[in-house]
């Protein structure tokens, strides 16, 4: 039995299906602009970012294709591979390098919105996306700093949770569940 609130929300959602997709997209673009500004004005490299930058340059030149961070054999190199692709597309610059974590941070906002929309409703998804955008300095800084793949962990972890909730809610058969678990 649905509550009155759920029925009101479904009527509200039917009224503006375009806004349901446009608003999270607008928030993602807003966050991208905030991160680009932070990258342009406030990003300074350190030893952690230098490691990823070196890996990205080596990957872009074709000299090395590491599976893990140099010196950290428990941290993956996905951030460096994305940064290498950005170097190949836009040339070498600190701004081009920071596009890798910015991309995953935008994915984190979208994944958070999808997760809370799946669990509760679209309004909760919007509120959760806003909470991610304005979550504080350290979250924002690691959204454009090449430093250990924090943005990748947040984005992929949230996507995995969203997919898990989505599969659970659909109550799949055992055969489909095996496919999803792969």
Image (cartoon, rainbow, N blue to C red):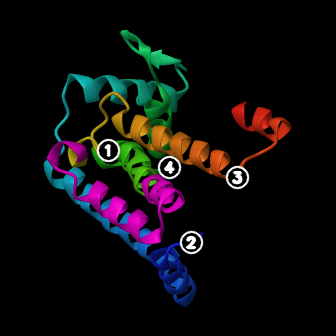
Label 2 or label 1, whichever lies nearer to me, is 2
Q: Using the numbered discs, state the Cα–Cα distance from disc 3 to disc 4 in whole angstroms.
A: 40 Å
Q: Residues within 10 Å of mark 3 (few under 14, many from 20)?
A: few
Q: Is residue 109 magenta?
A: no
Q: Residue at x 47, y 36 (%)?
A: 84
Q: Residue at x 70, y 52 (%)?
A: 170
Question: Is 135 left, or right, of 77 in this rendering?
Answer: left
Which residue position is annotated with label 2?
2
Q: Using the numbered discs, state the Cα–Cα distance from disc 1 to disc 3 in whole angstroms.
A: 45 Å
Say the numbered circle drawn on residue 139. none
Q: Secondary structure at mark 3?
A: helix
Which residue position is annotated with label 1?
93
68 and 174: which is toward the camera: 174
Q: Using the numbered discs, state the Cα–Cα distance from disc 2 to disc 1 in whole angstroms.
A: 54 Å
Say the numbered circle drawn on residue 170. 3
Q: Secondary structure at mark 2?
A: loop
- Comes first in the chain, label 3 or label 2: 2
The image position of residue 28, as x and y in percent, is 39, 64
- Comes first in the chain, label 2 or label 4: 2
Q: Using the numbered discs, state the Cα–Cα distance from disc 4 to disc 1 in whole angstroms.
A: 11 Å
Q: Secondary structure at mark 1?
A: loop
Which residue position is annotated with label 4?
89
Magenta span: 110-139
Q: Residue at x 14, y 49 (%)?
A: 42
- Comes first in the chain, label 3 or label 4: 4
């Amino acid at each position: 039995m649905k509550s009155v609130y759920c029925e009101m929300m479904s009527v509200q959602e039917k009224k503006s299906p375009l806004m349901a997709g446009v608003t999270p997209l607008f928030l993602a673009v807003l966050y991208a602009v905030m991160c680009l500004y932070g990258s342009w004005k406030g990003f300074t490299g350190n030893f952690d970012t230098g490691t990823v930058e070196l890996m990205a340059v080596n990957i872009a030149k074709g000299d090395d294709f590491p599976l893990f961070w140099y010196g950290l054999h428990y941290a993956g190199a996905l951030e460096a591979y994305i940064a290498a692709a950005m170097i190949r597309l836009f040339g070498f610059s600190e701004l081009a390098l920071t596009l890798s974590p910015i991309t995953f941070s935008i994915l984190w906002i979208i994944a958070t919105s999808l997760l809370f929309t799946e669990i509760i409703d679209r309004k909760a998804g919007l509120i959760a996306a806003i909470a991610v955008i304005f979550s504080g300095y350290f979250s924002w800084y690691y959204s454009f700093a090449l430093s250990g793949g924090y943005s990748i962990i947040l984005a992929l972890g949230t996507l995995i949770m969203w997919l898990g909730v989505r599969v659970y809610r659909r109550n799949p058969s055992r055969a489909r569940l095996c496919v999803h678990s792969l």
